[in-house]
Image (cartoon, rainbow, N blue to C red):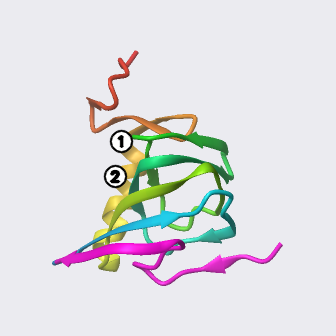
Amino acid sequence: MPTSKFEGGRFYGTVVNEWRVGNLSFSESVYPAGAQISRHLHPRAYFSILLHGSYRETYSGGVRECGPATAVLHPLGEMHSDQFLEAGGRIFRFELVSDEAASWLDRQIRATAELRNGRVRGFGGTTLLGEPQS
């Protein structure tokens, strides 16, 4: 199966907003209902939040079922594919654009993020999305 690799700061979908502040790149993209994105990877770690809609993401660890307010920390080089469901989707994301800063974020994700079925449950000891930590 062919695989795409993006430059940092590039994402699928229609980019509706984009900002850059120092080493941080912020973007917001929309995806139509039924959009399918083939297997690909990003060269930098990034954080995304689904603002609207739903999608299914397949990655090496399984399948993430993502609904509104789902937050996902993607480690650098994570191979994944996406399928947007009947409502399509709107995603806000940020990434560190310098390689040194991106490597730092990737280490933090791997060391401190607690994930459950691909969703962020806790980060750096903080509970997210109202789920109690056990």
Secondary structure of the residue carrying tag 2 is helix
As for residue 9 lying within the magenta part, the answer is yes
Mark 1: few, some, or many residues within 10 Å (few <14, many ≥20)?
few
Residue type at tag 1: Thr
* Residue visible at 66% across and 45% down in the picture: 61
What's the CA distance linking mark 1 and mark 2?
Answer: 6 Å
* Farthest residue, direction left: 22
| Label 1 sits on residue | 112
Q: Nearer the viewer, residue 71 or 51?
A: 51
Residue type at tag 2: Gln
Specify the segment rendered in magenta: 1-21
Give the percent coordinates (x, y) of residue 4: 66, 79
Whether pointer 1 and pointer 2 mark residues with C-beta atoms closer than 8 Å, the reply is yes
Residue 108, numbered label: 2
Classify 105 as above or below 4: above
Q: Is residue 63 left or right of residue 73?
A: right
Secondary structure of the residue carrying tag 1 is helix
Q: Nearer the viewer, residue 49 or 113?
A: 49
